[in-house]
Amino acid sequence: MYDWLLFLHVLAAFMVAATAVMYSAVALGASPGGPTIRVADAVWNVGGLGTLILGIWLALYVDGYEIWDGWILGAIVVWVIAMGTGERARVQLAEGVGNFTALHWVRTVAVVGLLVLMVWKPGA
Amino acid sequence: MTVLAAIRPDDWNPPLFLHLVGAMTLVGALLLVAVSLAGAARGGSVATLRLGFRGLLFAALPAWIVMRISAEWLASKENVNEDSPAWVDIGYMTSDTSLLLLIAATVCAGLAARRAGRDQAQGGGLSVAVVVLTAITLIAYVVVIWAMTTKPT
C-alpha cells in the first residue's frame, strides 16, 4: 500500500514538474502549439490533484508523519500558490493579456520549493 | 516499516534533490518534444520541429547528465554500488540505454528541422521517429520511477 501511494504521489509530482518545463518553453519564446498547451494543462490538473490527495493520504498513512507537521502544512501552502499562479498563467496565456511570464516563473519557483520541502522535510 | 520509510540521512538530500530536478526536467522536456512533434508530424510548422530539436539538445540531454551524475553521487552515499539491489540495476540499465535513444532522437530531430527549413517540408518520417523514440523513453522512465519508489528486491 505504502509503495503504491508513494509511486503515484511521485508520478503526480513528475506531471506537475513536466508542465512547468513545458510552459517554460513558452515563457522563453517558443510556440509549441495549442495541442501541446492542452496536454500540459491536462497533465498539470491531474498531477496537481494527485500530489495533494496522495500526499495527504501518505501523511495520514505513515506513522512518522502528521498532517499538522510544519513541512506538510508549508507544502500545502506552497501547493496552493503553485496552483493559483499556474491557473492565472494559463488564463493569461490563453487570453494574451497580463504578465504570463512572471506568473509562470512564480509557479516554477513554487514547484521547486515543493520539491525542496519534500526532500529535506524540515522539522520532520 | 512506514516509520523507517520516513528516515533518511541529511547528507543524502542534496544529491537526491539534484537527481529529482534532473529527472523531472528530463521527463518534462521529453513530453514537450513528443507532444509538439506528434503535432508537427500531422502538419506542424518548421518552428515546432526546431522546438523539438532544441528541447532535446538544450533541455533533455543536460537534464540527463544532471540526473545521471547525481545518481552516482547518491549511490556512493547509500553504498549501493557493490552488490547493487534490483531497483538500482533497473535505474542504471534504463538511464544508460535511454542516453542512446536520446542521442538518436536529437540527431533525427536536428535533421528533420534542417530538412524542413530547407524544403519547407514537415519533417516526415524523421519527426515520427523522434516521437516514437521519446515515447519509448518516457514509458521506460515511468517504470524507473516505479522501481525507484517501490524499490523491488
Image: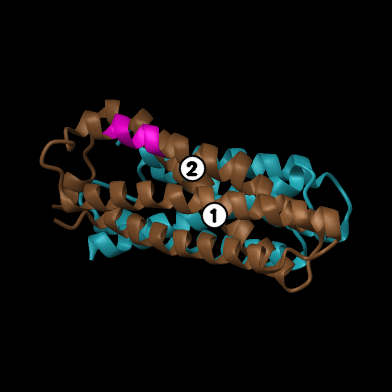
Chain colours: A cyan, B brown
Question: Which residue occupies the foreground of this view, B121 or A32?
Answer: B121
Dot 1, how many residues are within 10 Å of its Cα: few (below 14), some (14-19), or many (20+)?
A: many
Residue indicated by mark 2: A114
Q: Is residue B62 magenta?
A: no
Q: Is residue A84 visible?
A: no
Q: Is mark 1 on a helix, strand or loop?
A: helix
Magenta extent: B68-74
In-image side of B96 versus A85 (left or right): left
At a point 60% along the width and 49% down the height, the residue shown is B107
Q: Residue B141 carries which label?
A: none
Q: Residue A16 carries which label?
A: 1
Identify which residue is drawn at 31% across, 59% down.
Answer: B146
Instruction: Judge depth for marks 1 and 2 and give the one in front.
Output: 1
Q: Is residue B113 above or below residue A43?
A: above
The secondary structure that dominates the magenta segment is: helix
Residue sitting nearer the eye, A36 or B98: B98
Considering only vertical position in the picture, is B125 above or below A10? below
The chain letter for the residue carrying disc 2 is A
Q: What element carries label 2?
A: helix
> Where in the figure is residue B82, as x and y percent of width and height?
12, 36
Q: In which quarter of the image is the C terminus of chain A?
A: top left
Can residue B79 be seen here? yes
Extreme right residue here? Answer: A97
Q: Residue at x 18, y 58 (%)?
A: B152
